[in-house]
Amino acid sequence: MQKTILITGCSTGLGNTAAKTFARNGWNVIATMRRPVNSLEKEFPERIKVVRLDVTEPQTIYDAIHKGIKQFGEINAVVNNAGYGFGAIFEATPMEDIRAIFETNVFGVINVLQAAIPYFRTQGGGTIVNVSSSIGIVAAPLRAVYAATKFAVEGLTESLFYELESQNIFIRLVEPGFMTTTNFMTSPAARHADKDIPVPESYKLYHTSFMAVQDAPPSGVADVNHVAEQIYLAACDKSTKLRYPAGPDAERLINIRWSKPDIEYMEEMCHFMGQTSWRNAIQKNQ
């Protein structure tokens, strides 16, 4: 029987690639996005239906589910992919930006879950894949707010992993590392915040040093096609596996987190994040 999946955030990047991956593997795809464009439908006219969905507007989620069922008969899996991140010094980040990213990355996921879980329960089962990030396990400097949203998704998903088992609903976490297609941005408010908030010079040196590491991770970047394949694998897998790291840096970072005592982990992460470089830079400027 042909299966159907609903994926959020399909206009570009990982969501767009994931939609194509499922279509190529014979799935029907409800490709959702805030501002629909029909390029996916044109490429896969028999497999993909593009529908408007904004994860911060619950009614659009229910409407998308209804339209998908009307088009394909049922939905077997959902991928929570929509989200974004930004890098900023925490104390220079306006609360409006913090609330906005939580609305999408956390409450948006919750909105989709609250719509999908009752449907899957009535149907007799289904699979949910939440796209988290390696930063949801291994936090990084200048990513405090983004990390907080992904830690929230990790905790939410792990709790639901146990809670939904009796309903025959499988829930998974795909944890990509850094991707060149990652939806990272700096909002106008965050970009100009340091003009209004006094930021220590040491922070600015740290920012320069860390961004050099971030832009070229020592372990390499994650290939978006590989991450999409991990999403596909997670959606198809009926085992008890919860987490699917995706990308060389994600695999390395997660291995560091889980294989070492806390003190050793922190020391290795300081080295990995370029901590030595910025400490030396500060000393030279004192």
Image (tube, rainbow, N blue to C red):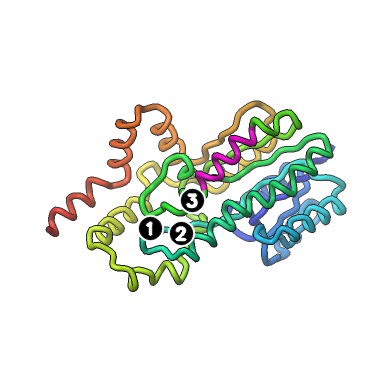
Residue in the image at 70% along x and 66% along y? 37
Percent from the top left, x then y, of residue 123? 83, 38
Look at discs 2 and 1 and give the one toward the viewer. 1
Percent from the top left, x then y, of residue 52? 73, 62
Instruction: Check disc 3 and give the amino acid type.
Output: Met
User: Where does label 1 land, which residue?
Assistant: 90
Q: Label 2, label 1: how many angstroms apart (C-alpha)?
A: 11 Å
Q: Label 2, label 3: how many angstroms apart (C-alpha)?
A: 14 Å
**Contact? badges 2 and 1 (CB < 8 Å):** no
Tell me: 51 left or right of 241: right
**Contact? badges 2 and 3 (CB < 8 Å):** no
- The residue closer to the viewer here, 95 or 119, is 95
Q: Label 3, label 1: how many angstroms apart (C-alpha)?
A: 23 Å
Instruction: Check disc 2 and give the amino acid type.
Output: Phe
Look at discs 3 and 1 and give the one toward the viewer. 1
- Label 1: few (<14), some or many (≥20) within 10 Å? some
Callout 1: SS: helix
Q: Which residues are magenta?
A: 150-161
Q: First in sequence: mark 3 or mark 1? A: 1
Tell me the tag on residue 179: 3
Instruction: Check disc 1 and give the amino acid type.
Output: Phe
